């Protein structure tokens, strides 16, 4: 301390220095801005243009020139690093145009190449590069017709012969969608300058690092595509295996989305969104149906119908979200905020829908259906694989908030690496799910195939039984020419008829149709035919025979029934007919009028009425089942009563009548039986 006012002098000195600090700082910034980046002794290698760049928001084509005053703050220029986005350097959430500028001083080492090149790492979203005011490269297109890409890639650009100059980069950032981070924009890493060979090596090294990091993902996608293709081919061979169909749809949709968004194909952002969003919906819906089939939830009509409604809603949300995201890239003004709000809302709805596998598994637990262990293992990995991307998607919607971003970064942190290949939570669960799914679908499909073979064998046995019960050759019918035709449909049906020669020289004919199809109908036919053969000689009268059949069948068909018509003929043309709710026969070109009656098997104690007619020489009688009447052509038109009437007007035999309906469009079993009265012998 100096004597004579020393403290006061010291304080004055400190105050003076404090006032000079801003001046020194501003001068330092100006000197720093004016000082170019020195690439001294540039040879065969490359050097990163790191440090501070001049940066300006907005757009002016003059900023590409070399004589721009970018060193003063009053012109709007500032300094930021090219090693991280502008959103992380004070311009959070900024979209639109911005410029980077850097003065570069180049000197070559002895024997170095005279040409230099530039390596530009990925930049969000579209950009142009100027060297000394000359455009040397670009990526994407600027408004009013912008083109940018979902995953930007690095580029290399030639700068010509080595000389000092100004490097200017014009960048345009698209409007933010719901999944975009507001700390992005512009450079993520500093560009590099060097010889063409060195710059090419940088590009190769970048691609190699990307390939090594994503090696696991590429292998998984290849496996998923292979499994999906095999499942699709297997389903095409057997369309009943819907488990294979949904597995193929899920795997192929997921891999296609990866190709559109992650593999750096030069597909414009708008196009990739238009294709990827609906595919996201297909993948989600396929996952739900696949999980529901694995958990045997298709056995519940309520759950299955609810799943169908949710699937339609999910697809509608994906389509609307596609339109909203597309609109963000093409509209302007106040509509941007509306479209961004719609994108946020639809994305939130979609993320909630992605939690559907959890209630599906809970439904399976509550229903307590016996399920094999592999089904539960697949369900567990389905939940894990589904919840990880759901959490990522939900967190990405709020990645603009610091706590949410930290959680997202934690979730995306690799669990471990294998030779540079990153294994994160999503990759691990996806791999385990694939192996569990292949094993489970193989086991389930093999069991289903075995069951289908057994069912097919049962159907073949039933069809053979029907052929035995309905023989092609009929007994002699004195006084008549009898023809019969039985045309079964693809399924085992319920048509039957029997021709029984009685001891008194008369003939008993019974023709009918059991409701329903399949093995149950076939077994009912076998039961009825056996009863007819046993009761024909005891109750030869048609009304008594139908009454006895009805009493024995009542309560034994479990909701089914059978229509039937019985008639008894003698050689002189006398015919007694009784009907149990069956279609009336045709005599020549006229349909007989028979009283209505209940079909067989509905209620016991039904009394059936008899009708008696006399068939003259040459008269034609035709009996048929509803398969003839209900034949349907490709346009959905029924054969109908009018065509049946015209058909029997021509007095066809049974084969001609049935073939007429088959050629029209068979939809059910068709049985026709005709009788023609012969002249009496002299």
Image (spheres, helix red, strand yellow):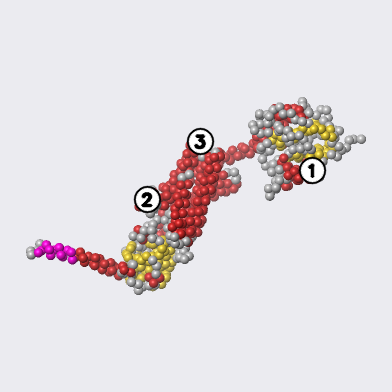
Is residue 11 one of those drawn in magenta?
A: yes
Q: Is residue 406 above or below residue 116?
A: above
**Of pointers 1 and 3, the one earlier in the residue sequence:** 3
Determine which of the numbered discs, if any, sits on residue 404 in the image. Answer: 2
**Of pointers 2 and 3, the one earlier in the residue sequence:** 3
Tell me where the magenta segment starts and ends, as one range.
5-16
Q: Can residue 374 be seen in this view?
A: no
Q: How far apart are marks 2 and 1 (CA)?
A: 80 Å
Q: In this view, does 65 lie to the left or right of 612?
A: left
Q: How far apart are marks 1 and 3 (CA)?
A: 56 Å
Q: In this view, does 64 lie to the left or right of 557?
A: left
Structural crowding at the residue carrying mark 1, measured as other residues with C-alpha within 10 Å and reported as few (<14), some (14–19) or many (≥20) = many
Determine which quarter of the picture holds residue 553. Answer: top right
Q: Quadrant of the C terminus?
A: top right
Q: In this view, does 473 lie to the left or right of 554?
A: right
| Residue ID for mark 1 | 648
Determine which of the numbered discs, if any, sits on residue 367 in the image. Answer: 3
**Label 2 with label 1: CB-CB less than 8 Å:** no
- Measured as percent of width and height from the top left, residue 498 is found at 75, 33
Outermost residue to the left:
3
Determine which of the numbered discs, if any, sits on residue 276 in the image. Answer: none
Q: Is residue 458 visible?
A: yes
Q: Nearer the viewer, residue 139 or 549?
A: 549
Outermost residue to the bottom:
67
Q: Quadrant of the N terminus?
A: bottom left
Residue displayed at 71% across by 33% down: 599
- Measured as percent of width and height from the top left, residue 132 is found at 38, 72
State the predominant SS element of the stretch in magenta.
helix
Outermost residue to the front:
334
Number of marks: 3
Structural crowding at the residue carrying mark 3, measured as other residues with C-alpha within 10 Å and reported as few (<14), some (14–19) or many (≥20) = few
């Amino acid at each position: 301390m100096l004597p004579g006012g020393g403290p006061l002098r010291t304080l004055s000195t400190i105050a003076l220095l404090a006032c000079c600090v801003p001046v020194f700082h501003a001068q330092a910034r100006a000197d720093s801005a004016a000082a170019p980046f020195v690439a001294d002794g540039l040879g065969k290698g490359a050097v990163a243009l790191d440090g501070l760049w001049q940066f300006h928001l907005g757009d002016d084509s003059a900023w590409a020139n070399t004589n721009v005053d970018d060193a003063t703050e009053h012109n709007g220029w500032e300094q930021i690093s090219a090693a991280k986005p502008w959103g992380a350097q004070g311009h959070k959430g900024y979209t639109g145009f911005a410029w980077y500028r850097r003065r570069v001083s180049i000197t070559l080492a002895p024997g170095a190449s005279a040409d230099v090149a530039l390596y530009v790492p990925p930049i969000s979203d579209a950009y142009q590069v100027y060297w000394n005011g000359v455009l040397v490269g670009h990526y994407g297109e600027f408004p009013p017709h912008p083109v940018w890409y979902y995953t930007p890639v690095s580029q290399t650009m030639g700068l010509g012969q080595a000389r000092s100059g100004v490097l200017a980069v014009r960048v345009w950032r698209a409007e933010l969608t719901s999944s975009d981070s507001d700390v992005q924009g512009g450079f993520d890493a500093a560009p590099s300058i060097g010889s063409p060979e060195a710059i090419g090596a940088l590009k190769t090294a970048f691609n190699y690092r990307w390939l090594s990091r994503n090696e696991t993902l590429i292998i998984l996608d290849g496996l998923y595509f292979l499994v999906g293709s095999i499942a699709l081919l297997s389903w095409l061979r057997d369309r009943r295996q819907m488990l294979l169909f949904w597995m193929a749809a899920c795997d192929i949709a997921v891999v296609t989305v990866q190709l559109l968004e992650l593999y750096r194909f030069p597909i414009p952002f708008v196009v990739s969104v238009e294709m990827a969003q609906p595919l996201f919906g297909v993948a989600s819906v396929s996952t739900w149906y696949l999980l529901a089939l694995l958990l045997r939830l298709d056995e519940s009509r309520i759950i299955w119908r609810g799943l169908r409604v949710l699937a339609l809603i999910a697809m509608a949300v994906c389509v609307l979200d596609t339109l909203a995201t597309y609109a963000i890239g093409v509209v302007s003004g106040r509509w941007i905020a509306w479209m961004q709000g719609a994108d946020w809302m639809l994305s939130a709805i979609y993320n909630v829908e992605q939690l559907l596998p959890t209630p599906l598994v809970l439904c399976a637990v509550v229903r307590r259906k016996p399920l094999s262990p592999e089904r539960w293992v697949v369900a567990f990995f389905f939940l894990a694989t589904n919840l990880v991307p759901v959490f990522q998607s939900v967190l990405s919607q709020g990645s603009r908030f610091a706590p949410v971003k930290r959680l997202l970064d934690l979730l995306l942190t690799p669990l471990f690496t294998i030779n540079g290949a990153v294994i994160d939570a999503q990759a691990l669960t996806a791999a385990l799910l694939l192996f569990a799914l292949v094993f489970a679908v193989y086991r389930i499909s093999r069991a289903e195939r075995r069951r289908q073979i057994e069912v097919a064998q049962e159907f073949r046995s039933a069809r053979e039984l029907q052929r035995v019960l309905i023989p092609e050759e009929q007994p002699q019918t004195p006084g008549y020419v009898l023809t019969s035709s039985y045309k079964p449909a693809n399924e085992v049906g319920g048509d039957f008829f029997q021709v029984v020669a009685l001891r008194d020289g008369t003939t008993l004919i019974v023709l009918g149709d059991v409701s329903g199809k399949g093995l149950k109908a076939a077994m009912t036919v076998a039961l009825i035919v056996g009863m007819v053969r046993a009761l024909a000689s005891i109750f030869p009268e048609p009304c008594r025979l139908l009454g006895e059949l009805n009493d024995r069948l009542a309560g034994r068909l479990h909701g089914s029934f059978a229509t039937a018509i019985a008639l008894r003929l003698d050689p002189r043309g006398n015919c007694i007919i009784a009907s149990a709710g069956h279609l009336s026969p045709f005599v020549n070109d006229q349909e007989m009028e028979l009283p209505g009656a209940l079909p067989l098997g509905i209620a016991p104690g039904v009394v059936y009425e008899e009708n008696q007619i006399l068939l003259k020489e040459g008269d034609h009688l035709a009996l048929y089942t509803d398969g003839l009447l209900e034949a349907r052509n490709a346009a959905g038109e029924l054969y109908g009563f009018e065509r049946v009437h015209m058909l029997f007007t021509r007095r066809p035999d049974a084969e001609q009548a049935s073939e007429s309906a088959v050629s029209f469009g068979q939809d059910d079993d068709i049985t026709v039986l005709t009788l023609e009265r012969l002249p009496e012998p002299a």
